[in-house]
Image (cartoon, helix red, strand yellow):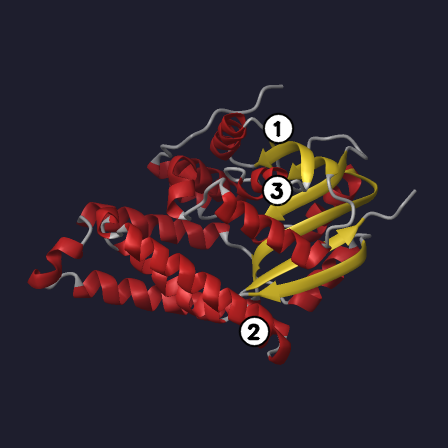
Amino acid sequence: MSDPAPNPHATEDEVKAAYADPKLANVLYHDWEAGTYDEKWSISYDERCISYATDVFNAVAGEDGQPYQHAMELGSGTGFFLLNLMQGGVAKKGSVTDLSPGMVQVALRNAEGLGLDVDGRVADAERIPYDDNTFDLVVGHAVLHHIPDVRQAFGEVLRVLKPGGRFVFAGEPTKIGDRYARRLGQLTWYLTTNITKLPALSGWRRPQSELDESSRAAALEAVVDIHTFDPSELEAMARGAGAQDVRAVTEEFSAALAGWPIRTFEAAVPQEKLTVRWRLFAYHLWLRLSALDKKVLSKVLPRELFYNVMITGTKRPS
C-alpha cells in the first residue's frame, strides 16, 4: 500500500476537526510546516548540526556500538537527527518515519541530496509498519511529546529493535522547562508585536496577515504538543514497556532561558532584518550558555529544572 500524499493546504473544516484529534493535528501542522521547517528551526546538514546531533547522542548513549548498521528515526520530521547522525558516523543505513507525509517527503529529499542510504515510510509511532527485530538503533528528536500513548510507542520501538538494540530519544520538554519556556515565548511575542506598532519601528513589523498565520500555527502547535516529562517518570515509562539499561539525561537551562526569547523574536520580525551578524551572535551565545549548562549548572542544579530531557535504553538480548 502506497503512503498518503502530503496535505499542506488544510481546509477550515479539517483544522476544526484537528483540535479534537491530536494525530490529525500532527499531520496537518507538520505537512503545513514541512517546506519551511529547516529554515524556521535553523536546521542544517553541515558540521554545526552534525556536531550537535552526535554530541547529544553520545551524551546519553556513549560511543560503544557505533556505527550501527541500520537505524530508524521515529517522527523524523525533515530528517535532522538521523541524517546528521549518519553523517557523523553513528549509523550506516537509515529509515525515516513520520506521521506527516510532507515531512517524510522532505526527509527523503534531504537524504538524497546528501548521498545517504535512506528509505522512508509514513508511520504512526503507536503502530510502526516494520517487522519485529528489524533495526539496530531507533532514534527520535522532539517526537515523544507528540505521541498520545508514549508507553505503547516504547513497546513498538522495542518490538522493531533487534535483541540488544538501542533507542535514543532527545529534545523532549521537561515539565518545569516547558513552563518557563512557553511563558518567555509568550511574553516576547507580546512585547515584539506591540512595540513594532510604533511608527519608528514599523520596518521591524511583519505584515499582519503573516502575524495572524503565525498565531494560528501557534494555536495548532498547542494541540500537537501533548506531553511534558519528568525525567524519572519517563525512565519508568520505558522500563514499564520492557526496556533495560534505561537512563535519562537533561540539558539546557541558561541556554533555554535565552534561546526561547531569541527564537520567538526571530519569528515575530521580518526575516530580512535578521542579518548574518545577528544569527552568528545568537548561535555563539547558545554555544556559550550550553557549555555553562553542561560544565557548571548540571553539576549543581536538579535535572528537573533543565529544558530538554533525552533518554536511552536497550532491548533485552534474546
Residue that label 3 marks: 88
The residue located at (63%, 77%) in the rendering is 299
Locate residue 151, reporting x and y percent.
71, 52
The residue located at (53%, 25%) in the rendering is 112
* Mark 2 burial class by Cα count in 10 Å: few <14, some 14-19, many 20+: some
Q: Quadrant of the C terminus?
A: top right
Against 70, is 214 above or below? below
Q: What kind of element bears circle 1?
A: strand
In the image, what residue type sits under mark 2?
A: Leu
The residue located at (17%, 56%) in the rendering is 204
- Distance CA(mark 1)–CA(mark 3): 15 Å
Locate residue 185, reporting x and y percent.
37, 64
Of the image marks 2 and 3, the number of the one nearer the N terminus = 3
Residue at the right extreme?
Answer: 318
Q: What kind of element bears circle 2?
A: helix
Residue 305, label in figure? 2
Of the image marks 1 and 2, the number of the one nearer the N terminus = 1
